[in-house]
Image (cartoon, coloured by chain):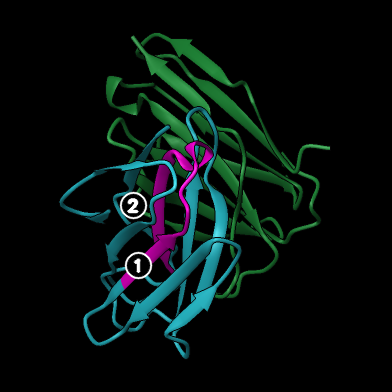
Chain colours: A cyan, B green
Amino acid sequence: GESVGLHLPTLSVQEGDNSIINCAYSNSASDYFIWYKQESGKGPQFIIDIRSNMDKRQGQRVTVLLNKTVKHLSLQIAATQPGDSAVYFCAENRGPGGSYIPTFGRGTSLIVHP
Amino acid sequence: DTAVSQTPKYLVTQMGNDKSIKCEQNLGHDTMYWYKQDSKKFLKIMFSYNNKELIINETVPNRFSPKSPDKAHLNLHINSLELGDSAVYFCASSPGTGPLYEQYFGPGTRLTVT
């Protein structure tokens, strides 16, 4: 499944499928990006980060892709599990004015059906 | 062994009251933050302190006053509470002020103003 984080706030997938969550960031000067996972009733939790000198970074079951040309990030989750159900945020390290202000995207709710 | 803790977890109060939220981190981090998350899950930074010094203040009404007695604590005091202040407030910390650090979030304080 695939979503555009800013336009489709909910992504529903079946357990075992691969999930792709997309994010359009705002500042072309941003040079550090993070994906966070927020489970219900909890604070956001770091998943994976990527610097602007990279276009891909892999973690355990997760991969982040960065396309600076179109200011786009994606988070790929392999073999999605019910425990992956949460809201996912991308964050960049610069705000609209260009200063170092952690700036979060709108978030995408991932629902994993068993 | 909670890394970032906040008290209280829930706060229900009436318009016009003054309230405080406390935050403590035991990670030895230099930088702490306050974020506001609205009902649509939008997460926006309010303040950031580095070693007790205010470094980010994002156009927050002056009814909100952060206070950092030491680098492990960042409290948020809100005067004359308004209905629009109802939200979840998150405290976070990071290892440094630089732009290349992830943040560690507390569990949040749900503030309801009636």
**Amino acid type assigned to the residue bearing label 2 in the image:** Thr
**Amino acid type assigned to the residue bearing label 1 in the image:** Ser
> Which residue is under mark 2?
B59
Q: Judge from the rendering whether residue A28 lies leftward or rightward of residue A112; answer left or right.
A: left
Q: What's the CA distance linking mark 1 and mark 2?
A: 30 Å
Measured along the vertical axis of the image, is residue B51 above or below residue A64?
Answer: above
Pick the quarter of the image with the N terminus of chain B.
top right
x, y (%) of residue B52? 69, 55
Q: Residues within 10 Å of mark 1 (few under 14, many from 20)?
A: many
> Which residue is under mark 1?
A74
Q: Among all residues in the image, which is located at the extreme left?
A: A7
* Chain label for disc 2: B
* Chain label for disc 1: A
Residue at 38% x, 46% y: name it: B43
Residue at 38% x, 49% y: name it: B44
Residue at 37% x, 78% y: name it: A66
Looking at the picture, tell me which residue is in the foreground, A90 or A21.
Answer: A21
The answer to whether residue A86 is magenta is yes
Select label 1 or label 2 by which is in front: 1
Give the secondary structure at mark 2: loop
* Span of residues in magenta: A73-93
Measured along the vertical axis of the image, is residue B16 above or below residue A54?
Answer: above
x, y (%) of residue A35? 47, 60
Where residue B12 is drawn, which disc sits there?
Answer: none
Measured along the vertical axis of the image, is residue A44 above or below residue A72?
Answer: above
